[in-house]
Image: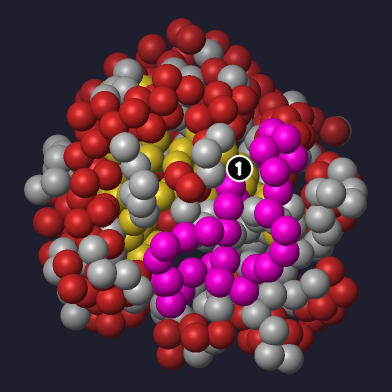
Amino acid sequence: MIHLKNFSFLARTLRRNPGMIRVQPALNLFFLRYIARFRIKDAAGHWIVHSHLPPLNHKAFGRFTRDHLLDRSPGPSHAQIGLTNACPQRCAYCYNRERRGQAMDTETILRAVRELKEIGVCWLGLTGGEPLLNPDIARIVEAAADGCAVKLFTTGSTLTREKAQALKQAGLFSVSVSLDHWRPEIHDRNRGLAGAFATALRAIDLFKETGGIQVGVSAVVGREMIRRGQVEELLEFLGGLGIDEAWLCEAKPSVAAFWDPGQVINEDEHRQLVRLQDRTNRRAGLTVNYLGHFESREYFGCNAGHKMIYVDACGEVSPCVFTPMTFGNIRERSLKEIFGEMKSYFPSEDTCFINKNFTLIRDAGRGRGFLDPAASLQVMSQARFGPLSGFFRLYDRGKRNKKA
């Protein structure tokens, strides 16, 4: 059932973006069913379903409709880029833990942003390391925000009122501050830094005071939290912070410490988080955005290397932030060329690639936590992909009909 306020937002979106009428009817119905799981909200002037999609009244949503739903661009719609590998925290599950090399300078990052937009990216996540440690972050946001919805993932470290204001002025639409637990000592231990909890709360307050930005929390939840029913307790705490969104993701087997089948979420636990998301989203207030729901077989599936791309702080190109492998460096080859080759190995499927294939990465690495291009190709020669997700079954059907 679609929330009544959603109809108003959708009607206004259609007036702003009339090209949606020409989208394959089955895809429009699919999006309506998906959006019904959320309450569209006006967050600081942005009409937001959740932070993993461009706001409905943003130029980026118009580009997404035109380039990906109508013109069927072969390029990615979503990307993340690392602005630095430097970070004061030492999270056990950090997906950048084993990445090494010379960090990109600002001009190289700006070139990467331009190339990402040229090949179709309309949603860009800024990550690290701690991206706030890059002194040119506001300049990078401003370069990306013309035609691209820009989201920041941060621990909150080094944030000041002036820096938050500069990011708002540059065009940042959303921020997710890392906060994994309601007890300070547990969050600090998970993050490997005393005071990390206090830093996160201060950053949330600063972004809220600044206004003009959707403010959320990104929380990494382990199997133990799910089994004990503690995720609901975490959401109750987050709801009390007055934030717009809780972005949830289970701990991924991206680093050696998590290369254990016993730590990978199972289907029952996945369904438990989906039900919790839906229960919470029926109430007014906090939006819960569980990545595993977005990437589920019923909806968009895993798009690593297909509609998602990650450029790390050293210029290495990966299918997504959670896959510790590279298909080339943007200092040596064009991003378009690297993505085209990578996509030929990633047809999209209904199951998370890293959850399913981390043992191949572990074995190919032989003790290394990050695979070079040769080892990455070795993994892809053995990887097997399942069926397409609900969205891509419809999308590919429409593409075939268009050719006919």
Residue 350 appears at what percent x and percent y?
Answer: 58, 62
| Residue at image location 75% in from the left, 75% down from the top | 371
Quadrant of the rendered image containing residue 62:
top right
Give yes or no for residue 272 being in the magenta stretch: no
| Residue at image location 28% in from the left, 82% down from the top | 224
Q: Is residue 65 above or below residue 283?
A: above
Residue 230 appears at what percent x and percent y?
Answer: 18, 72
Query: Mark 1 = which residue?
Result: 78
How packed is label 1: few (under 14 Cα within 10 Å), some, or many (20 or more)?
many
Q: Nearer the viewer, residue 315 or 222?
A: 315
**Total numbered badges shown on the rendered structure:** 1
Quadrant of the rendered image containing residue 93:
bottom left
The boundaries of the magenta stretch are 82-110
The C terminus lies in which quarter of the figure?
top right
Q: Nearer the viewer, residue 391 or 363?
A: 363
Q: Is residue 66 above or below residue 186?
A: above
Res 244 visible: no
Residue 336 appears at what percent x and percent y?
Answer: 83, 42
Work out which residue is located at the far top of the displayed protein and give it.
15
Magenta-drawn stretch, dominant element (helix, strand or loop): loop
Name the secondary structure under disc 1: strand
Whether residue 329 sits left or right of residue 272 in the image: it is right
Give yes or no for residue 100 being in the magenta stretch: yes
Res 146 visible: yes
* Mark 1: amino acid: His
Residue 361 appears at what percent x and percent y?
Answer: 69, 81
Q: Is residue 180 above or below residue 10?
A: below
Please say which color scheme the image uses: secondary structure
Whether residue 321 sits left or right of residue 396 in the image: it is left
| Residue at image location 72% in from the left, 58% down from the top | 102
